[in-house]
Amino acid sequence: MKNSTFFFSVLFTIIFSSQSIHCQVYNANYAAVVNQCSSSNILNNLTEYEALGVKRRGTVALDNTLTWLKNKYLSYGYTASQITEDSYTYTGSTAVCKNLVVTKIGTVYPNTFIIIDGHYDSINGTGTNDNGSGLVCILEVARLLKNIPTKYSIKFINFSGEEDGLHGSQHFVSAVVNATIPKMDIKLVFNIDEVGGVAGMVNNTITCERDLSSPTSNNAASAVVTNELITCVGLYSPLNTFLDRAYASDYMSFQSNNEVITGFFERNVTTHKHTPTDFLINMDPTYNYNVAKAAIGAMLHFSVVDTSLTNEEFESSFQGSIYPNPANDLLYVNCGKLDRNYTFKLIDLLGNTILTKSFEIASQNEPILISDLPKGIYLGVIESGNNKYTKKIIIN
């Protein structure tokens, strides 16, 4: 809304080329993912979102949209333990609103997050453009990146309360980001709001938004990542770009908290937002599809696809392993031919480091006591010098 203007399983057999966050060239492997973006998914999801009705605070429609979103993420393979609801109320309303947060952990920087966000509430109408159009882009990013290992963790956040004054994102920043000890480490916030285009117009340009507001300490960093976003649009979509400022959407709650932000907004601005006629019929779903492709390419770039050793490569090259798997009370780390000075970590599906053990001159098979840990799926990480190995661990 604006008030004006496998890791656990590999998606395919090719190995991604490494790419620096600052060095951008066309990556055929990124393009192969982008090209799996589904125009039918975009259209079907817009249709389903519209049918859910007017999604104002305190309405059944808003609750049903939250459930709809959760079911989408579950259908893509995200687990219930990766999905959290951030509940809140705010002055002037007794309604309990909820943000939906889905976390995909990174393999190298599990505690540093790339946030991609958009609001799911609407006002006066179904909000199919404002902001069903942003949601369907985020869903396609989540679907296609689900089984791709990324160095940085990703949080897919669907905010409520945006149309009433950014209440959902403000609550998340104060009650989650700043209440995390230490404070949540956010590398970038990428906001997608109103990107459905205008029916009957030539929709071939996406507005890329950077921070020009106070506090100004992160404005330069925002300019850098927005230039990278512009490059991604050119590399992975047919769209042109227009550079503008960021304002009046959920990323501003993060901007006020001194985080680095960027965003997408349609260049041809609809006249139907915040009205009963904000319908799919007044949008350009092909444009929405092209914006989704650009967003997928950008998120592959920002989250940095990991090319660390696969399980098979580690076990054959270094003759190491983490076993048994599934495990009950004890987990054993066999460092194989790696240096005997190493660190072992267990990380949960929300990116939290649950256990850390550092060894000096470790024995060949070191036991790790896990009997006090909750049952579930974890990421086991061995770090030794420049070598890093990650493996999915199940604790029964």
Image: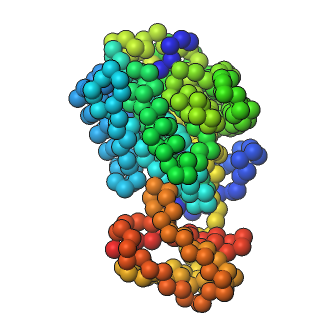
Task: Quadrant for residue 390, please give it.
Answer: bottom right
Q: Give the residue at x 59% y 44%.
A: 186
Is residue 199 depicted above or below 298 in this figure? above
Q: Is residue 294 left or right of residue 230?
A: left
Question: 341 or 140: nearer the eye?
Answer: 341
Q: Is residue 148 left or right of residue 81?
A: right
Camera sees residue 243: yes
Residue sitting at the far top: 271
Is residue 332 depicted above or below 40 in this figure? below
Q: Quadrant of the C terminus?
A: bottom left
Is residue 13 depicted above or below 176 in this figure? below
Q: Position of residue 124 (x, y in %)?
A: 33, 14
Task: Quadrant for residue 320, please give it.
Answer: bottom right
Camera sees residue 130: no
Q: Is residue 217 left or right of residue 94?
A: right
- The total of numbered circles placed on residues is 0
Task: Quadrant for residue 218, please give it.
Answer: top right
Q: Is residue 392 left or right of residue 275?
A: right
Is residue 384 depicted above or below 269 in this figure? below
Question: 155 or 290: nearer the eye?
Answer: 155
